[in-house]
Image: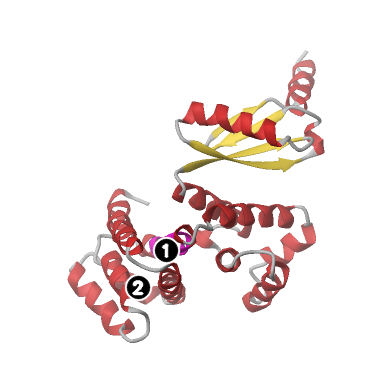
Amino acid sequence: MQAASRESYKIAAERLDAYVRGAEPSAVATTADDILSVAALLRREPRLRRALADSARSGEDRAGLLDGMLRGKVGADALDLLGALVSGRWSTPSELLDATERLGVAALLASADSAGDLGEVEDELFRFGQVVASSPQLSSVLSDPMAPAEQRATLVDQLLADKARPVTSYLVGFALTGFGGRSFAGALTRLVELAAERRDRQVAYVTVAAPLSDEEEQRLGARLSAIYGREVSVRQTVNPDVLGGVSVRVGSDLYDGTILRRLNETRNALAKR
């Protein structure tokens, strides 16, 4: 997002945090669903997106337009939060759409946080992403934008039935729509990161040839926490192809100490002789 859009989102996010502090988790989840339903409307209606992001109209006018369309169709809390969002300044209509989606996701994660389930939701999202990544056929089906969304959502519901929390299932279904213009896998990754961010944590993606023990994972997490100055969620991917060692990615930082990397470096050095 550009600076003006970031500031507008920040104001709405602060209002969301204030709302969450005084609301029941179930009410927050309902508000999140309302916000995401409006995001889906904005995705389908580019003219509406443009009208709500039009800098030639006052913020009050744009909020009034939204209120006139949605009053009685979504809850008052969702309408208040959406009004705060659209009354801000938006660099482009697409950034308003992205912000609406993110606000809905933030509300859903906040409901899980209030219920004490956020750590489990983060873990379930990551593990489902691993399941999908390990099955090319499943990944192809769920990532296919040409396949009917309802069929893909039904498949997700079947895969997660009685295996994940409702918030996790909802977010996986939402990832199918391409959260923020991302691929399905990219959307799942971003949701994991937002869940960790809500817990004031950084995510470390760790690739190893064989699973780390609990003690090794805790030791690695402690070292990374010391480096980054905040708690770190270690998310392991087992890939025998790396042969040994550890690759760690935190944000844009990559620490690759795998045997595969060393072999590739040696092979490249020999090829240059």
What residue sits right under mark 1 in the picture? 107
Between marks 2 and 1, how big is the CA–CA gap?
A: 10 Å
User: Which residue is rendered at x = 37% and y = 81% of the image?
Assistant: 74
Sequence-earlier tag: 2 or 1: 2
Q: What element does badge 2 sit on?
A: helix
193 vs 99: above or below: above
Is residue 40 placed above or below 93 in the rendered structure?
below
Residue at (69% x, 67% y) in the render: 160
Q: Position of residue 7 (x, y in %)?
A: 28, 52
Query: Picture quarter containing residue 188?
Result: bottom right
Residue farthest top in this picture: 273
User: Which of 222 and 46 lies nearest the eye of the viewer?
Assistant: 222
- Name the amino acid type tagged 1: Ala
Is 42 or 128 nearer to us in this picture? Answer: 128
Callouts 2 and 1 close, C-beta under 8 Å? no
Magenta residues span 99-111
Occupied quadrant, residue 34: bottom left
**Of the pair 44 and 12, the residue shown nearer to us:** 12
Main secondary structure type of the part rendered in magenta? helix
Judge whether residue 101 is colored magenta.
yes
Residue that mark 2 sits on: 78
What amino acid is at disc 2? Ala
